[in-house]
Image (cartoon, rainbow, N blue to C red):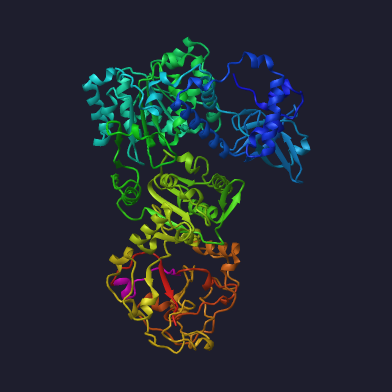
Amino acid sequence: MTPWSPGRLVNARVKQGVNQWNVNKCWDESGSWDAFYLRAWISQCIAERCQTELNSATHIDTNFLNGKEHQCVQDFVWENFQIDQHKPREVSATFSNINTRKDGRVDVTNDNYKSRMRRSERQTVIATTSTGREYNTRAYGVKGKKTTLGGFDRRVSDDIQSIRVVGRQDPANSERLADSLLLCVLQGKKTFQKSPFIRLFWFPNWKKFSPPPDSAASREDTVQKVLDSARLNTSQEEVVRKAQTNERILVVHGPPGTGKTTTIAAITRIWDLHDCPVWITAHSNVAVKNIALSLHKRQVDFKILVSKEFYEEWHEHMYAAVQDNLIRSDELPASGVAMERLIGNSCIILSTLGMLSNPALEQCGLFKLVPVERMIVDEASQIRIFEFLHLFELFQDVLEKVIFFGDPHQHMKTIFDLEHLNTSHRRFLLNTQYRMPVALGTFISSHVYGNELRSSHDDTSSNCVLFVNVPAPHGAESKLGSSWKNDGEIRTVVNLVKQYYHTKNFAVITPYDAQRGEIERALKAEGLPWENGVFNVDSFQGNERDYIIVSLVRTDMPGFLSHMNRINVMLTRCKKGLVVVANRDFLNTKGYNILVATFSRHWTRTHGHGAWADWREIAAGSVDAPGVPAPTPGLRRFAVSFQSASHGYRSTVSSKYESFTGGFDVSKLFPKRQETPTRPIGMPAASSSRRSTDFSDDYRQTTDWDIWDEDYDCEESWAESPEPFNSDFSFPPLVSSGQARPTTKAQRNVEDLETSFPTLRSTKAPPQQTSNRLHTHSLVGKTANAWNRPMPRSSQAPATSNNRAIKADSLHETEFRKPIKSDGPLATDHQLHPNPIRIRRHWWV
């Protein structure tokens, strides 16, 4: 029986017609003193009118409990209170359609499963019109994606602009069972001492129960047959064999990609051949589905239980391969005979941990047909320890063995944190990962798993990771409700999908649900794949995709990013490639100590400048991404140090391109400048009072140019050398006045960028060029004599409105993007890597 809400109780026993939502709100606002006083007064009013029920109720008596049981109850209540305080009190609903029915009620089509409007006595729905007027109603029914709300006038329903849901959700079945167990323990009706698993978990020093018999352990031929067909590694085989013993609890540490699901399937197959009933559970439906697919491939007979609310219209596509094995919660028959027909010969049942608390399973006799004798818990690192308490009590008479699979380096405090359950005879480690490319797996092993994790993967290259910089002000965090979003990162993620991954098996992961919702809407608006493609990090644990795009969101404070376990989940979901969209300055300053910042520094140190790309490069499709070459292959990049070249020193070449460049001296490509000039070339005379050897921070700065030209004839137009050097110099326009819209993809991308971001466009015409032509043998030497000398950092970067040069003070690296030609020794003798040329310049005095 569902317990009544406070509002319903007041309406029935104290005063009819009372605003139930206002009453329930007093219990929701636990941090308010006014709400506290009102709760006390309302409770007194109810007690005065319920004397009969109070007199017949069993009173609480803690004399039944010893000290350790007192502590267990205290920890249980405190943990639930803390979790309840962090639940949102208000959620913005996303919807796509509103229809007014003949009976006056309104059907609203929800867009997002997590924020969908559900029927609840404790919540109210507030609809806001375009004029800002608010209308309060409630949800009366839910079917698939549609929620039925109380009636509105048709003119009002047609004008609804936003909907938000205020108040707490009704407690889930598992929460009700846990509360019921707690009350019975406090009343002395039940005890913790009868369950062997409760004693093992919370009272390890109490007298142990004798281990249960296990008939499967004696049939070595069956075990060996399954092991031979499963092709497991040594650590996986050790876990499978240990599962056949009479040890009640096993704790298996499985880092990402180590084959937890494969190991579970092998254990289950052995028990299935021995007709041993098995229940396989996990925290999420997705994790349960993954196990179902693994069992289906191995032709294991099983049934999977799914709630109607999760399945209907929302996630039907997830279960297409196992449709014949699926049982919806609303299809459970009322009689045991009908249930036996539905189950057939299956002795393996898959469900979420929450589904085990559904009273309908006991009512239909399923627990008698398939007793919960053996339980396998996958992704146990997502499950709080106290979530097992009521289940261990519920199945205390039949439960013999529990095996936990998970990763102690992911998410909250769990079973893996109980030291007395992580002894050598119970703890096992799956030590070989098969998911991530070797370079990524090696970093994760050394920085998270103490070098205990080995990698076995076909991809041993260093092209599996790319960081994309989205600096402020283009990308900055902003508050959205109780969550966070970053508009610049949203646009960059959309460009990544549009330019690179729309045909690939990809997923977008972000730590903030507001960002997830905004990315979904942006992808949908662009006509790009979005369904089942954008996830909050907590809902994606246990999943994997070929390519993962991570949006970090934060640019000021780390927030959730300081939780290494969450970052570990985000970085370890890819099978082929990972793209991290972030603010580079943030990772180098306020976010310096988080795991992803350590990863970015490690990747930059080992892979050079190619580890990072700019958001403009992604928008233009001019840089290679993991698994996908640049959509505009004519644009190339090559990393050298302009400072070393301009001073006549040996060039510093990125290690990524050393094999392509050999040991040539870039300085030979440029005329040498004076070693001690009276003032920086191109600087105003007012600056000449500085000592020429003073490398002041005022001038030693990095300035950037992005040249988005793909087809311009550089030899004829850029080889002129204006003398003396003019600080107003800028590169020639990509398209001159009167020309049609550019036809190449790169040119169109740039024009679209400049339309959206006019500050990226220069404002004055280039200077008059002279006939003093450079004669060098390099493509770089042919491009612009301006590169032979330092240009002053100026905030006035003049150019015409047609000029495609980016303002020098707005970027951080120089890009020269021209197709590599084969007419010079630089191109022919040294065989440059076919990537864009990137030149970094340092101004000096």
Residue 741 in the figure: left or right of residue 390: right
Spot occupied by residue 487 in the image (x, y as percentages of width and height)? 57, 54
Is 140 placed above or below 568 here?
above
The residue nearer to you, when weighing 7 against 596, is 7
Q: Is residue 373 magenta?
A: no
Residue at x-position 50% and y-position 43%: 536
Quadrant in the picture for the C terminus = bottom left
What's the magenta region?
814-828
Residue 678 in the figure: left or right of residue 38: left
Quadrant in the picture for the N terminus = top right
Spot occupied by residue 626 in the image (x, y as percentages of width and height)? 39, 53
The residue nearer to you, when weighing 384 against 744, is 384
Residue 348 in the figure: left or right of residue 41: left
Spot occupied by residue 206 in the image (x, y as percentages of width and height)? 36, 24
The residue nearer to you, when weighing 642 against 405, is 405
Spot occupied by residue 50 in the image (x, y as percentages of width and height)? 69, 18
